[in-house]
Image: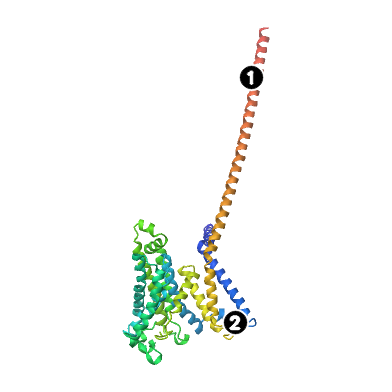
Amino acid sequence: MEKTKKFFTELSKRTFNLLKSQGAFKTYSSIICIVISLFIGIIFLLCMDPANALPEFGNLITGGLKFGSANFFAILAKTAPLLCCGLSIVFANKTGMFNIGVAGQYTIGILGSLMFALQFNCPWYVCILMAMVFGAIWAALPGLLKAFCNVSEVISGIMLNWIALFFTNYSFQTYLNGCVDITQGSKTYDLDKINPGAKIPDLGLSSSTGGYFTIAIFIALIAAIIVWFIMSKTTLGFQLKASGLNKDATKYAGIKEKRNIIISMAISGALAALGASLYYLAGLEEWSVQASTALPQVPWNGIVVAFVGQLSPIGTIFASIFTTLISHGSRFMLQTSFPAEIGDFITGLIVYLSGLTNLAVILVNKYLAKRKEKQQALTLAGGEGGSLITNENVVKEETSNSESDEESNLESKDESVSLNNLEENNEEGGNK
């Protein structure tokens, strides 16, 4: 009984400490940002069409929540690439890098995965691996420029984004023209027709889920766990985070900061390319060579979910699911009154408000620090007052003891004097 009581007491203490941690404060801030954004979204819907605002807002939230439906599996299928792009941003940010070139690495991942799937007829796992290699090499370029030439990864990343897009389109139109079906508007061939083995396994559930279900979502979740493990439990992750916090200190400690910059960018690019392969090898869409004159939207949304998830691998999982739910649910709204872009509008609000979470955490920390100082001051004041009281008691006790000792000494002297007088009287009487 005592062990059980002790166990629950310890569990409650740990839970309480966890709820007061920095991660908990960031989670609360993200939830508050989401709630405020949804509230602002409702206000805009009321301004646009008051009669249909609340019912259509319900469709926005619950459009794809029915478990087992095709829309539910569509959300999972679109979450997988978005999660990988978010992890790419998170991994680079942990090492002090802002990988804005994630869109170019995603596009190069499309080239690598479809090239080995359609041109060389490789199985799906080889195509995914080669896409990650392509993305890692492409992301290592800004890493090399940053490490050895001190070129900002933001500038080089933006430049390489467009180079990746035009290089991919040019390659499909020239050297890899066997991958493009001209009769279908210059789109890449359907995997089911050319190389079914390159399609990510669906465990036989594709037909019953509208063609959306594959194991891509599980691969993305495993990637999130691996990223968390590397950053939290390995020496490499410690070195990468240390390099991001203070490069000079890590250099003084003997850590090779240039190597860490290149490694972090390469891993970040591999994650972005993994997201591209999980989308296009799932057969969700074919790459349009001529129509793709703009960078894909998914990598940019990856930046969104990374910051909404507070740059945490686990938080990015939930942020990816929520963002995909909003964007997919906007299709179920009444399009004559509410355009599908309302989902992007709410997501943008969440991003802007999530930028204030760090400020909220700082203010909370200052409040807690002041509160702790006040408690310490009160404790010290109480301790000094207690010591004064005890000192007064000691002085009173000593005074009373000394007075009692003096009284006892006087009494003993009086007794001795009276005894001496009696003895003298007795002696005089005997002599008489």
Residue sitting farthest toward the bottom: 183
Label 2 residue SS:
helix
Q: Relative to 368, does residue 431 appear above or below in the rendering?
A: above
Could you say which quadrant of the image residue 136 lies in? Answer: bottom left
Is disc 2 surrounded by few (<14), some (14 to 19) or many (20+) residues within 10 Å? many
Percent position (x, y) of residue 91?
42, 68
Residue sitting farthest toward the top: 432
Residue type pointed to by label 1: Ser
Q: CA distance from mark 2 to mark 1?
A: 109 Å
Relative side of 31 to 411, left or right: left
Percent position (x, y) of residue 355?
52, 67
Q: Relative to 221, does residue 181 appear above or below in the rendering?
A: below
Q: Relative to 404, does residue 327 appear above or below in the rendering?
A: below
Q: Which mark is residue 416?
A: 1
Is disc 1 surrounded by few (<14), some (14 to 19) or many (20+) residues within 10 Å? few
Q: Residue at 40% of width from left, 72% of height from top? A: 157
Label 1 residue SS:
helix
